[in-house]
Image: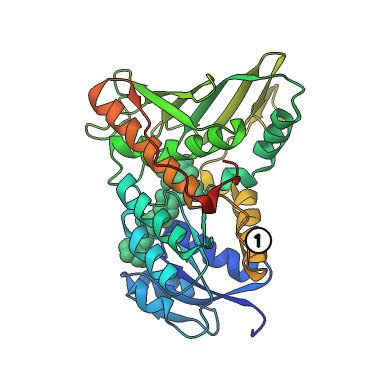
Amino acid sequence: MGDLLGVAVLGAGHMGADHIRRLDRVVSGARVAAVADPDLIRAREAAAGLTGVTVHPDPIAALDAPGVQAVLIASPGPAHEEALLGAFTRGLPVLCEKPMVPDSTGALRVMEAEARLGRRLAQIGFMRRYDTEYRRLKALLDGGGLGRPLMLHCTHRNVSSPAGFTSAMLINSSVSHEIDAARWLLGQELTAVTVLRPTPSAGAPGDLLDPQFVLFETERGALVDVEVFVNCGFGYQVRCEAVCEAGSARIGDEHTMVVTAGGCARQEVAPDYLVRFADAYDREVQAWVDATRRGEVTGPGAWDGYAASVVAEAGVRALETGARVAVDLAPRPALYAGGGH
Ligand SMILES: NC(=O)C1=CN([C@@H]2O[C@H](COP(=O)(O)OP(=O)(O)OC[C@H]3O[C@@H](n4cnc5c(N)ncnc54)[C@H](O)[C@@H]3O)[C@@H](O)[C@H]2O)C=CC1
Ligand SMILES: O=C1[C@@H](O)[C@H](O)[C@@H](O)[C@H](O)[C@H]1O
């Protein structure tokens, strides 16, 4: 046990429980040392069967628990800032689920706190960067064979949204993945956003504005459109097509099995992100554990988390006002210089 990276997992809901299972059974080099959730029953259930783990209702107490050397934050977005700052104060490396911090002012505080430390401790859970299809698309675009990317057409559909999901969350929770993926794939910052919406689907609960059509502009003149539809009812679908000067490439149609029977072919569609991105989460957490053990951060960091929050906040304002909203990023601190997007 002594050689394994001891991880405190904060939040034992859908993602936290899945990451606990992953740390325990899938990735190598780490173990769960502490679990925190104000819902102690949930925390105990998630930690059941693990040895050498302590369970806490208070997330900050978990950071000080015996054997904790790193933190995985899987609590709701509004709880992330306190947990990130608590980890930084203790010098603990962190993998924080997206969004890093939902509001841009809090995200700036977190990025500036890390910049003041002078060393990177945080990785943000933008797992699409670890998905095989996204990585192939990134390599193709970086290779330049298709020429300059002109547009990305993205689709992000969920079967249904969880209770409490708001119209703003279509952008700052769901589309936050496309925001990061677009910045990473294109190697450019997003500079403006416009949001249009059709008459909401009859399947949208309450007054949820679902679906939405989000259009981003980038610093070198590319366009990124995202159809986000979180109560589509028929499957989890994430697609991205890059249209370049000399060709196009699309991902998101694979990851499936085609069953032919009775004179017709049926293609399976993943039910949710835990299935569609299972491999990506595994690779993400393994890469984080490996880098943490080497004393490095190699994945998307606090600058990426901050940029995503600023762009998402502009998107929420665009949704609320119907206007095109410019993205206003603070200067990039030297700690993140040359770190790409
Ligand atoms: N990367 C991805 O694809 C996904 C990421 N997420 C992100 O993961 C995080 C958690 O989402 P879910 O697991 O879906 O939510 P959830 O609602 O299933 O679980 C959240 C858990 O955190 C607990 N909690 C509340 N306040 C807390 C605090 N201060 N400290 C510790 N625990 C606290 C709750 O009691 C609950 O058990 C969010 O940031 C969400 O955006 C969620 C789904 C997919
Ligand atoms: O991060 C995620 C959720 O929080 C979000 O609500 C879903 O729309 C995304 O598909 C999922 O990946």
Tell me if 39 is positioned left or right of 246 in this view.
left
Tell me if 331 is positioned left or right of 148 in this view.
left
Question: Where's residue 67, x and y in %?
Answer: 53, 83
Residue under the image location 42 percent in, 54 percent down: 111
For this orientation, the residue located farthest to the top is 245
Residue under the image location 31 percent in, 43 percent down: 165
Q: Mark 1 packing: few (<14 Cα in 10 Å), some, or many (20+)?
A: some
- Residue 71 shows in this picture: yes
- Residue annotated with mark 1: 286
Q: Quadrant of residue 315?
A: top left
Residue under the image location 52 percent in, 45 percent down: 273
272 vs 341, nearest the viewer: 341
Image height check: is 201 above or below 69?
Answer: above
Question: Where's residue 237, x and y in %?
Answer: 53, 33
Q: Quadrant of residue 27?
A: bottom right
Give SS at disc 1.
helix
